[in-house]
Image: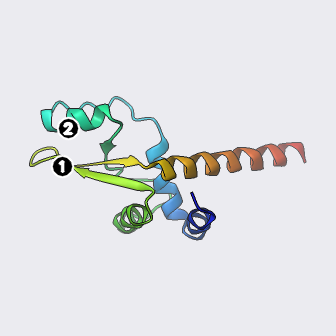
Amino acid sequence: MLDLDLALLDAYPEWRQVLLAYNDDVDSVILTEPETSEFVARGFRPRVREVDGVPADQMTRAHGKLIAHGLLQVEITGRTGGMLYQLTAAGRQACLRLTGATENESLELALA
């Protein structure tokens, strides 16, 4: 992952929030469609539709930018399955660095 990716995520906090939402655990996503079960088994999940602090009109743009920058990938799973999303390796690395930075900043504030 490039530092440019982190700089972009710093410059566009709504992109960062959407990316981190895909890093969260999915609470009992049940997709029984045969078209989607293979993708869900590989770690894909339904589109995150709402993120605290991100206006609804920015969600589509944020998804598009994350896909364009190689941080998020999308699969079209057929006529009934829809679209599923997954962090790329670069996206997972960005999340690790972002959450690590957040934890380190919190620790520094607590020790100050």
Q: Counting other residues with Cα less than 10 Å from the Cα at mark 2, is it few (<14), some (14-19), or many (20 or more)? A: many
User: Where residue 47 sits in the image (x, y, percent)?
Assistant: 31, 50
Residue 46: % across, % down: 29, 44
Secondary structure of the residue carrying tag 2 is: helix
Query: Residue 103, relative to residue 29: is it above or below?
Result: below
Label 2 – label 1 distance at C-alpha: 8 Å
Where residue 35 appears, x then y in whole percent? 14, 38
Pointer 1 residue: 82
Q: Pick the residue in front: 32 or 87.
A: 87
In the image, is residue 33 above or below residue 111?
above
Quadrant of the image containing the N terminus: bottom right
- Amino acid on which disc 1 is placed: Gly
At 50% from the left and 52% from the top, the residue drawn is 90
Callouts 2 and 1 close, C-beta under 8 Å: yes
Mark with earlier residue (2, 1): 2
Crowd rating for badge 1 (residues with CA inside 10 Å; few <14, some 14–19, many 20+): few
Q: Residue at x 48, y 43 (%)?
A: 23
Please state the total of marks drawn on the protein image: 2
Whole-percent x and y of residue 79?
9, 49
User: Which element type, helix, strand or loop, lies under badge 1?
Assistant: loop
Q: Which residue is mark 2?
A: 36
Residue at (41% x, 67% y) in the render: 65
21 left or right, relative to 107: left
The residue lying at 88 percent from left, 43 percent from top is: 111
Q: How is the image coloured?
A: rainbow
**Residue 36, above or below 48:** above
Callout 2 amino acid: Thr
Residue 52 visible in rendering: no
Residue 50 appears in the picture as rendered: yes
